[in-house]
Amino acid sequence: MALIVQKFGGTSVGTVERIEQVAEKVKKFRDGGDDIVVVVSAMSGETNRLIDLAKQISDQPVPRELDVMVSTGEQVTIALLAMALIKRGVPAVSYTGNQVRILTDSAHTKARILQIDAQRIQRDIKAGRVVVVAGFQGVDEKGNITTLGRGGSDTTGVALAAALKADECQIYTDVDGVYTTDPRVVAKAQRLDKITFEEMLEMASLGSKVLQIRAVEFAGKYSVPLRVLHSFQEGPGTLITLDEEESMEQPIISGIAFNRDEAKLTIRGVPDTPGVAFKILGPISAANVEVDMIVQNVAHDNTTDFTFTVHRNDYNNALQVLQSIANEMGAREVIGDTDIAKVSIVGVGMRSHAGVASRMFEALAKENINIQMISTSEIKVSVVIEEKYLELAVRALHTAFELDAPAAGNTAE
Amino acid sequence: MALIVQKFGGTSVGTVERIEQVAEKVKKFRDGGDDIVVVVSAMSGETNRLIDLAKQISDQPVPRELDVMVSTGEQVTIALLAMALIKRGVPAVSYTGNQVRILTDSAHTKARILQIDAQRIQRDIKAGRVVVVAGFQGVDEKGNITTLGRGGSDTTGVALAAALKADECQIYTDVDGVYTTDPRVVAKAQRLDKITFEEMLEMASLGSKVLQIRAVEFAGKYSVPLRVLHSFQEGPGTLITLDEEESMEQPIISGIAFNRDEAKLTIRGVPDTPGVAFKILGPISAANVEVDMIVQNVAHDNTTDFTFTVHRNDYNNALQVLQSIANEMGAREVIGDTDIAKVSIVGVGMRSHAGVASRMFEALAKENINIQMISTSEIKVSVVIEEKYLELAVRALHTAFELDAPAAGNTAE
């Protein structure tokens, strides 16, 4: 008799048939004795259809009105799922973000949840009803409809689970769990039974786009056990928890993440004086370019080199800004490279194990892969390498850290 | 400087282009110094699309959930229109029924408005904003989303105009006003400048489907001046008012209404005893058949004949019920006819003019049209005739009551 919040994304509710399948799944859990709150997204394609309609009126639709429109997507899904449940004899009721009351700030199209009123839902649960809640949306203090931004339904699910003190928040998606790395790159990648919130955050931000980062942060902050599962396949999925102890018995490294969306920029021979980093990155940030890795090595001859990475889409923009900075500072030159990739090893085991980074560098050296940049955090070591070596590097690291599945081949079906 | 509520139906907002046209029209009124509240329906076709989607889940979707779904139609339109206004430099804000707070009873899919909170809208008007409100929808005391049933947007418009004490409620539609009769039947039909609420009610219930009956009733009850106008053509339209005096100078009869959706049933030779009407109509009503005209003539030989009309769709059902009643009562026989039409003359002038009915009968007699049933009210005389004479009868009456346009041809463009 657990209270479970289940979240189904746009693909899982993309057609009437799939909504019926979701209803079957919910019914099965409920028949097993659990109390269920379901969070759903808009049917896949619907949000884009609505945004396209708005763009026919205006290139930059007023955010308040865009939220009024786009929030109708989930509103349709909650009604359809509630109908499908009731048809199966499962008492159910649907609520919009406003009806629950999911209170958010007023940052339209990217609002943040401030508070959730759990009373109404708790009354329904007590009365034996499955509650179906619209993800991705809320309402501000003045009663304006808000949306949480793309992928916000995950956040709704976690926030509801926290407010209801649910036993678990299950995120149903199109993969059967979190993997040690991308199975398309490494055939021997394995599904993880467990991963910590911190590891998940490092994996997610590096391109393993299984869960929305905000949802994982939220789950970590409120200690909501989070499970990633496949919508239409059976299986235990991957549990994301606070629980570090058990994971200590697991490999030191939980996974290999990578990212080929970045580009590298270097400004050479800048005067080694205080404030130089700000002089360089201030204008970059003012140009709305987000910076990922930053490396500055020790100076020689009173000048230093300063390197950072940005998203490839921002490369040209950043290059221009950097060139005018270089002129002003009297720097020697600006160079850049878009053919790079970032590879990271992630694992809380690193905290208690020495020599993890050197084991990584050794594995790369064995394959003759040159490391261009290094950056480390408590549970992650990232390197930038030439893009063409990406797959080779990921596979070498996957083997070196003993992540390969025991039998040959992919354990994912 | 008037406060005007303008209502645009589904066809008037059926495409993005039309929504832009509506925005232009609203802007023009506002530039002229008026305060405007706009009520809109769902884009044409959208409500049916949503209902079809629901029917894929269930033949009889739960009404509460159907309302959650269907109400998204207007929610999309209000946002689009608000965007189109803001793009034109007109400050605007959209509200759903729930946001306004249009309080209704809980009769999902056919709710009735109980109360409208005017404060929020009044604040916006004071701040110089055009307020765009979703028609057709509201919210019950418990916060459940409700809809008013088909055509309910007219009612929303009138109810808002009443709550805001607006100077006029303008209903924009695909005709340029209310006509003396259907211009497709009588080429010389004329647009009426004015008509009273009572006349409009009689015209509307008889098939001149320009306005929803509930909206007219509401407007009459709260003395809201109502004007029917064409969405995309210029013109004064038809004003619907309480004001009878002026219309006295107009023709005695305002219009000729007609209806070919009815069928006639007669039960012959029933005992002429008290309670016979109830014995007959009780079971008919219990079978969910609505009865329109009822005629019972004086008895002879202690038996009487009892005739009534129903919608043609209900004819077979009513006939069955009537036959079993006839057996129980020992009536002589049951006969029926579906090839009938009802023609009515409508006008408040009747109250102060004698001989209106006989003038009607004279005109029909001249054309050799036999009258099968007669029913009268204070401002209406209706007759049932053979269906094939319908057009002939309507034209004859239109001429007899001097309603023909002075020049030959139709004054409607």
Image (cartoon, coloured by chain):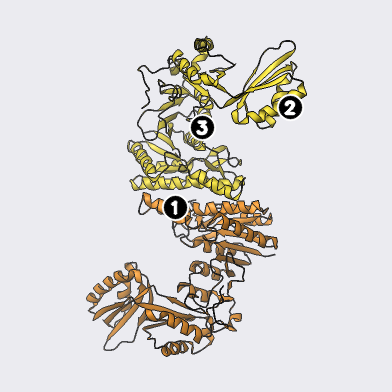
Chain colours: A yellow, B orange
How far from the left and from the top, in percent, is residue B11? 52, 61
Categorize mark 1 by other alpha carbons within 10 Å: few (<14), some (14-19), many (20+).
Answer: some
Question: Which quarter shows the C terminus of chain B?
Answer: bottom right
What residue do we see at 53% from left, 75% from top? B179
The residue nearer to you, when weighing B374 against A297, is A297
What's the chain of the residue with tag 1? B
- Distance Cα–Cα, label 1 vs label 2: 56 Å
How far from the left and from the top, in percent, is residue B124? 65, 54
On the same chain: label 2 and label 3?
yes
Which residue type carries mark 1?
A: Leu
Which quarter of the picture shows residue B161?
bottom right
In the rendered image, the vertical position of residue A143 relative to residue B239, given as above or below? above
Which numbered circle lies on residue A212?
Answer: 3
Q: Would you name the residue on which mark 1 appears?
A: B50
Which residue type carries mark 2?
A: Ser
Q: Would you name the residue on which mark 2 appears?
A: A324
Residue B86 placement, left or right of A9: right
What's the chain of the residue with tag 2? A
How far from the left and from the top, in percent, is residue B138? 51, 56
Q: Nearer the viewer, mark 1 or mark 2?
A: 2
Q: Is residue A142 visible?
A: no
On the same chain: label 3 and label 1?
no
What residue do we see at 58% from left, 49% from top? A56
The residue nearer to you, when weighing A197 against B397, is B397
